[in-house]
């Protein structure tokens, strides 16, 4: 299955029982997701066909900022699982247990990133010790607000070490999202949005409802479970990719443009990042439990399956933690 990234302007339409963009056929049976970055026209006939074939479409604006997704009608539905998802959100103790495990996994993956670079001459011992102390605090937390507060402190400490990890000169003091105010914040926002959409696509392949979450509060107009799951995989997929892109000089200040109060990626920068992102998703590891090769993308679906088993009472949920 392939993801298609469309930068050109034109029309996406159904043609001869397939999908066509400007006379180029996309092989619907081999299409996973479609990402639209250009000004693309499409009609309900096209969207209906995409929905029938379970293809999600993700939309990005002129500046490359994610704006939303067309999410096909759910075909893998389970009333029993939906009831359990809601139950585990409504009962505070059950919700806290899942939320805490998500942040334990995310913080462990963050720590491993720091440990990797610390072993390669980047002195981040101070930040590692601080994060360890926050992980101890996390064990004692018993409310969502406490967990979110600790998560914020871990992230703040982690980001404070980035100037040591990245070989290029960067102006990065704090995380700014709306809008991103420098090249690092722009990279983080763009690649995190890709991880979010990948999590959405993997959740869609399971029976989980993407709007019911545990760490992040469910709300209108967002798939908040994707935010939960993406916390675990951002250190592995997004952050390591950012370090690699910058330290190998694959991305530099020249790949960005600046408006009055924000930065955005130029098209050539987006294309380089998307190519690398696809390579990351396809990268494989030997899974400890399955004893076979699985891709980074499939690790996300396995995380969904683990959560399902927890909700159904089959096996206690343990978040994914890097072991290499």
Image (cartoon, rainbow, N blue to C red):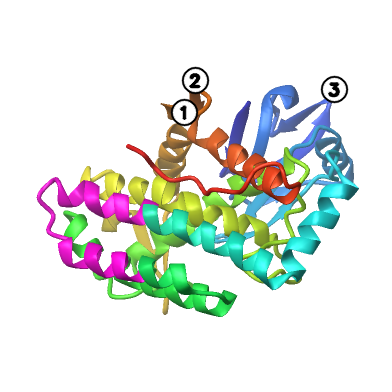
Q: Is residue 132 above or below residue 278?
A: below
- Give the spatial CA distance, label 1 vs label 3: 41 Å
Residue 85, above or below 147: above
- At 74% from the left and 23% from the top, the residue drawn is 29
- Give the Cα distance between marks 1 and 2: 6 Å
> Which image quarter holds the N terminus?
top right
Q: Which circle marks residue 150 in the picture? A: none
Q: Residues within 10 Å of mark 2 (few under 14, many from 20)?
A: few
**Residue 283's spot in the image, x, y percent?**
43, 29
Q: Residues within 10 Å of mark 3 (few under 14, many from 20)?
A: few
Mark 2 = which residue?
Answer: 292
110 in magenta: yes
Q: Secondary structure at mark 3?
A: loop
**Which residue lies at the image location 73% right of the left edge and 43% below the top edge?**
204
Region in magenta? 109-134
Task: Locate residue 18, reporting x and y percent.
Answer: 80, 26
Taking depth in this image into account, of 12 and 307 the one nearest to the observer is 307
Residue lying farthest to the top in this orientation: 292
Question: Quadrant location of residue 273?
Answer: top left
Residue corresponding to mark 1: 287
The reply to whether the C-beta atoms of the residues labelled 1 and 3 are less than 8 Å apart is no
Residue 24 position (above or below residue 299): above
Q: Earlier in the sequence, mark 1 or mark 3?
A: 3
Residue 113 in sight from this viewpoint: yes
Which of the labelled discs sits on residue 16, or is there none? 3
**Residue 30 image position (x, y, % from top left):** 68, 23
Q: Earlier in the sequence, mark 2 or mark 3?
A: 3
- Residue at 16%, 52% (x, y): give it: 118
Whether tag 1 and tag 2 are in contact, CB under 8 A, the answer is yes
Mark toward the start of the polypeptide (1 vs 2)? 1
What distance separates the C-alpha of mark 2 from that of mark 3?
39 Å
């Amino acid at each position: 299955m392939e993801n298609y990234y469309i930068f050109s302007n034109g029309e996406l339409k159904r043609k001869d029982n397939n999908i066509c963009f400007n006379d180029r056929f996309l092989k619907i049976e081999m299409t996973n997701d479609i990402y639209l970055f250009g000004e693309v026209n499409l009609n309900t006939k096209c969207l209906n066909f995409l929905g029938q074939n379970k293809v999600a479409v993700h939309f990005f604006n002129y500046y490359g900022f994610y704006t939303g997704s067309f999410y096909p009608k759910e075909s893998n539905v389970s009333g029993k699982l939906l009831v359990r998802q809601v139950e585990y959100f409504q009962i505070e103790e059950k919700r806290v247990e899942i939320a805490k495990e998500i942040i334990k996994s995310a913080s462990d993956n963050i720590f491993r990133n720091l440990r990797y670079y610390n072993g390669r001459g980047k002195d981040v011992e101070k930040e590692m010790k601080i994060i360890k102390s926050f992980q101890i605090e996390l064990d004692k937390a018993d409310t969502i607000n406490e967990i979110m507060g600790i998560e914020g402190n871990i992230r703040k400490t982690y980001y404070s070490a980035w100037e040591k990890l990245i070989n290029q000169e960067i102006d990065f003091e704090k995380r700014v999202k709306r809008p991103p105010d420098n090249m690092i914040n722009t990279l983080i926002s763009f690649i995190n949005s890709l991880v979010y959409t990948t999590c959405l696509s993997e959740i869609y392949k399971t029976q989980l409802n993407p709007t019911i979450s545990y760490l992040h509060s469910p709300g209108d107009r967002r798939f908040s479970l994707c935010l939960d799951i993406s916390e675990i995989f951002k250190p592995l997929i997004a952050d390591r990719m950012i370090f690699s892109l910058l330290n190998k000089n694959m991305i530099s200040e020249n790949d960005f443009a600046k408006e009055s109060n924000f930065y955005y990626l130029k098209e050539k920068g987006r294309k380089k990042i998307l190519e690398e992102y696809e390579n990351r998703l396809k990268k494989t590891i030997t899974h400890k439990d399955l004893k076979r090769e699985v891709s980074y993308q499939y690790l996300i679906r396995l995380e969904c399956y683990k959560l399902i088993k927890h909700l159904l009472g089959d096996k206690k949920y343990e978040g994914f933690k890097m072991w290499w």
